[in-house]
Image: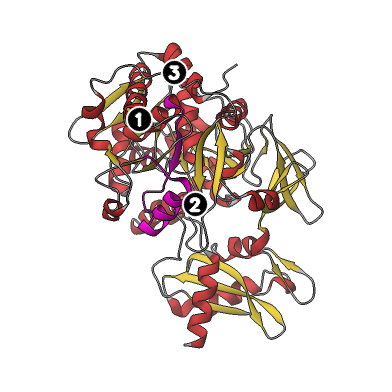
Amino acid sequence: MTKTLVQFLQDAADRFGPRPALFFKPSIRYQKWTYTDLWEGAGRVASLLQQRGLNKGDRVLLWGPNCPQWVLAFFGCMRAGVIAVPLDMRSTLDFAERVADKTEPGLVFVSRLTPPAHQELNVPKVYFEEMEELTREMPDPRDAEVADDDLAEIMFTSGTTGDPKGVMLTHANLVTNLEGTAEHVPGNPSNRLISVLPLSHMFEQMASMMSALNCGANITFPTSRQPTVLFRTMRERRVTTMLLVPQALDLIMKRIEAEVSRRDKQRIWRFMLKIAAHTPFRLRRLLFRGVHKQFGGSLKLIVSGGAALDAELGAKWSALGIKVIQAYGATEASPTISCHTLKHPRFDSVGRPIPNVDVRISEEGEILVRGPNLTPGYWNEPEKTAASFEDGWYKTGDLGFMDQEGFLHLRGRKKDMIVLSSGENVFPEDVEALLIKHPATKDAVVVGLPRGSGVEVHAALLLEDPSAVSEVVSWANRQLAEHQQIRGSTAWPDEDFPRTHTLKVKKGVVVDMIQGYASA
């Protein structure tokens, strides 16, 4: 049984050697890396690291965009026994310096596309664009004797305040999570993925990179996340599979429906969606062949993660003839905790726990997780590690429940739950899900704001017309329970809410800004 990522990659190269693994189009033609190329290229990177004086257990930062060189650098670290420390492309210099102070890296892989501030980072650098030339004549690396309980990577939180904490993940954590995930979503060698979400986050790293390489599929890295580039790449590569967060799924669907409105085809669009729900998948794709043409004609599967997917949105995508399965996870869990199977997707839950992960709900409604995929803790943070575990169970900070069929349902973050002075609880996600259904609403965030001795439910609304705020709130309140009623509202003045790198809204920043507007 595979126990380390080194064995995983070697096994993939043995099984799929000449098959294409990675595609990239930096100019007019696609470049291709086979599975053999990936194994050998990672070996040359490992040899480069060893030549630069790095030994097993040393740390290396990866601060660059998704591309084949990122993958080669990552697995080069694995073959050298070096611990990878991925950074989001959009990390600030301050954040990168704090991570460097904590991990004392011997080298950082960067790109010319990495924010210019990277030049000020006082760590030796290797550029992705120069990696091929630097490693061309490298000999085979020395055997680093990597064990399953050795650290593979440290994933740092990307919060804007406070000290970032580094989630330690071992080879065994990642390999066992891959095995469990593959039992729910086995993958297929004919799959053609496009890598959109950052590889510096575990969702893309596990469900895209590792899952694709596990089954002999291939991954294409677009040169930009601009919609025109993404759609062109999807058409050129006839992409079958992609990972998206619900926010992105919603944005794409709104783009499609905006085009429907522009052509004044709303009535026929609604009629087609209605009949598609009772039509086989193959015929749905014919029914909406114009939409599929924009995606290249081959997109069949979207894996949604990072937040709960609105059931109505999931049903719309399914009506188009594209399967959408949800996954739920946490970086500390490597990351998959639960997901749906291809045969039984549902949009009202985040699936059943994968086979080697145990889940239970605490008395307070918090989701607790246990399994071989769980982090041994936070890098040099024993107190934070102890606070996150209870009798071997990881406390996710998410609220949820299990239904009678064993499906897990999310209720939102424990820290975001609004506790009223009456003792009743309001789950912001429930109110937000209703608000975004109003046609005037582009997006909505619901928070609890202090008012006197209590807390009020407050909605921040992103609207096409800011004057519609009262109309939207009144419309929602007519459908909400008494304790859920929106008592205050703000028409958001910016183009979007402040978000993390994975498009989650920074609710703490939203609260601070609302209070700032009120006191101005």
Q: Residue at x 55, y 66 (%)?
A: 507
> 481 or 293: which is nearer to us?
481
Q: CA distance from mark 1 to mark 2?
A: 57 Å
Amino acid at dot 2:
Arg
Q: Earlier in the sequence, mark 2 or mark 3?
A: 3
- Location of residue 197 with respect to 193 vertically, above or below: below
Q: Please, is residue 357 above or below residue 80 in the view?
A: below
Which amino acid type is marked by label 3?
Asp
Label 1 or label 2, whichever lies nearer to me, is 1
User: Circle 3 is placed at which residue position?
Assistant: 143
Q: Residue reaching furthest top? A: 14
Give the magenta range. Answer: 80-106
Q: Which residue is mark 1?
A: 49
Give the residue pinned by disc 2: 270
How many numbered discs, if any? 3
* Residue type marked 1: Leu
Q: CA distance from mark 1 to mark 3?
A: 13 Å
Mark 1 surroundings within 10 Å by alpha-carbon count, few (fewer than 14), some (14 through 19), many (20 or more): many
Q: Secondary structure at mark 2?
A: helix
First in sequence, mark 1 or 3: give its number.
Answer: 1
Q: Secondary structure at mark 1?
A: helix
* SS assignment at label 3: loop
Report x, y in % for residue 368. 72, 46
Q: Quadrant of the N terminus?
A: top right
- Please say if 205 is above or below 5: below
Q: Are marks 1 and 2 in contact (CB under 8 Å)?
A: no
Image position of 136 (left or right of 370): left
